[in-house]
Image (tube, rainbow, N blue to C red):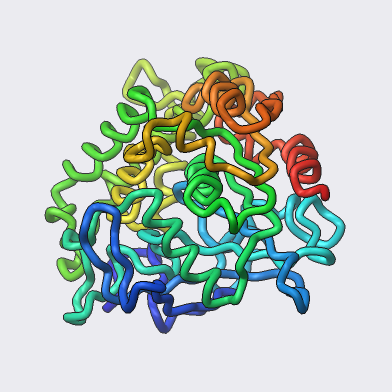
Amino acid sequence: MRIPGPGRAWQPGDEPGQRRFAAVATLDGPGLAMELGEVLPEVTVAYETWGTLDDDRSNAVLVLHALTGDSHAAGPAGPGHPSPGWWNRIIGPGLAIDTDRYFVVSPNVLGGCQGTTGPSSLAPDGKPWGSRFPRLTIRDQVSAEVALANQLGIDRWAGVVGGSMGGMRVLEWCVGHPDRVARAAMFAMGVAATADQIAFCGVQRRAICGDPAFADGDYYDTGASPDEGLALARSIGQISYRTGEEFADRFGRSPQGDEDPLRGGRFAVESYLEYQGSKLLTRFDANSYLVLSEAMNGHDVGRDRGGVEAALSRVTAQVAVAGIDTDRLYPLALQRELAGLLPGRPQCTVIRSEFGHDGFLLEDEQVAKVIRTALAP
């Protein structure tokens, strides 16, 4: 069954690109037990790899994507991948994550829509999960990644790296599976979701759920999809990912083309946000946006672990923490708090950027320097 619209979720039979697929199982038996009590009976993880795994399997690096990312962290656009890799200038021969040295693994997150089991995937009854898909936590996502590592025969990662939602998963790897992480680098996140972050996600959720085509999440066989809601959610998110200063410099109060904002036309910044929203429709599923946003809202490394300080005391990896000086969604204070609570009190590196939260995707040289240092033996 195909999702209506222009390819917003990968489905079996689509061009795989570089994706590989692993039907993963946990050590406790078939299916993946969720933190909140439900069980996903079948889980497939889509992933991509670069480089060669050493005979002793000691050179593997795990790269974890953010909310709307996917497994295509590096490589050109092409069949199965409409865009180049999102860290194309970070991963590759001679780059910060050097594929001549490391075996790099980048999975699509559990709950996503680019090959890994998510709401658009078929449930055991042959119908899309839709509204029946269980609520996930960041720890559930890491559990799926642990199962993938087990299947690949990787007992310990030489490094685990990611930003934003990917950084949350890096932290959960370090706390929940300390013996399996040697080094780590995490960008633009904190120890727990803040009220501000939850608020931004909340209004985005309302935008999606309020779309008449949402059908309570069961829109896959209706011939429609909540395009307007998803595009609006992305536009709202884009405001939080960038900065007011960038908007002022790029757009100011300029109209869009020859439109007159005083007579019903748009300002250029409005057109930009509409474009960002519509662009996401070509590669993402609204239910995945909801599921992943809710997982981010639930992020709290100290939950059921005796609090944040007790949880972070479990970390044994060599950890690098970095934040962006203009990030208004995950302010630098959050990364400084995290660094100050980690064993060894690592320095929090400040990335200077005009781009706000998106700086971890755009400031290649500064991000590369952090990662090179983090992975250095």
Residue drawn where x is 73% and y is 67% of the image: 58
Residue 59 position in % (x across, y down): 75, 65
Left or right: 130, with 311 as reference point = left
215, above or below 166, in the image: below
Q: Nearer the viewer, residue 85 or 235?
A: 85
Residue 370 position in % (x across, y down): 75, 38
Residue 47 position in % (x across, y down): 54, 69
Regarding residue 69, the answer to whether it shows in the image is: yes
Left or right: 251, with 230 as reference point = right
Left or right: 49, with 275 as reference point = right
240, above or below 88, in the image: above
Regarding residue 351, the answer to whether it shows in the image is: no
Res. 188 image quadrant: top right
Name the quarter where the N terminus is drawn.
bottom left
Res. 92 image quadrant: bottom right
The outermost residue toward the right is 94
Residue 352 position in % (x across, y down): 71, 24
Q: Nearer the viewer, residue 297 or 33?
A: 33
Left or right: 95, with 172 as reference point = right
Residue drawn where x is 59% and y is 56% of the image: 179
Q: Nearer the viewer, residue 129 or 158?
A: 158
Disc tally is: 0
Res. 362 image quadrant: top right
Residue drawn where x is 27% and y is 69% of the image: 40
173, above or below 195, in the image: below
